[in-house]
Amino acid sequence: MAQTVLTSPEVAHKIGVAPRMPTLWAERGYLSPSVQDADGRGSQRLWSLDDVLHAYIVKILIAHICTRDLRALNLFVRAHPKALQPGTVWRIDLTDRRILRVQMVDTVSRASAVRATSAGIFLIIEVDVVCAGLAL
C-alpha cells in the first residue's frame, strides 16, 4: 500500500489552521516532517498521516505549553514511534505552561492515569479519538 504524502498547505487544511502554520511550526522545531524536510529555497516539506496527527496535537497544545516544551515533545514523538499509533493514550502533566511529565499509557491503566496526579492539571490525549476527528 502506498504511503499518503501531503504538502504543508494540505496538512494545514486538514487540521484547520492557516496554510503557513505547519511550515512555521517545523521552522520552530515543534514538528518534523517524516517524509521529506525542506532542503533549500523552493523545496517543500512532505508529511505523512502520522505527521498530520502530530500537527493536530501541536495545534491543541500550543495554547497550553511553552515553546521549549513543544520542541521537547517533538523529540519525544520522534524517539517513540508508537506514540502516534492507534490505541495509544498520552497523559501530560502540566504546571504553569510547563510539561512535568509525558507518559504513554495503555487502555488498561488509563483510568488510574486519569485519577492520580500530583500536578493538579493534566491532559489526556487519545490517539484513536484524534484520528477519528481528523478522518485519518
Image (cartoon, grey):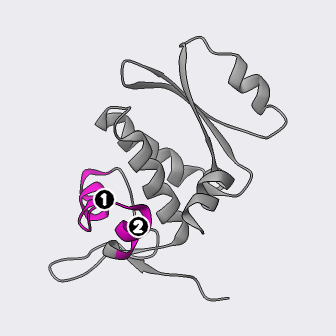
The image quarter in which residue 33 lies: bottom left
In percent of width and height, residue 18 lies at 26, 63
Q: Which residue is mark 1?
A: 26
Q: Which residue is mark 2?
A: 33
Q: Is residue 83 magenta?
A: no
Q: How many numbered circles are shown?
A: 2
Say which amino acid is labelled 2.
Answer: Pro
Q: Residues within 10 Å of mark 1 (few under 14, many from 20)?
A: some
Magenta residues? 10-29
Q: Is residue 12 magenta?
A: yes
Main secondary-structure element of the magenta-colored stretch:
helix
Q: Residue furthest right?
A: 108
Closest to the observer: 103 or 133? 133
Identify the mark at residue 90; answer none if there is no mark. none
In percent of width and height, residue 102 lies at 56, 32
Identify the residue at horizontal 39%, vertical 60% (top origin): 32
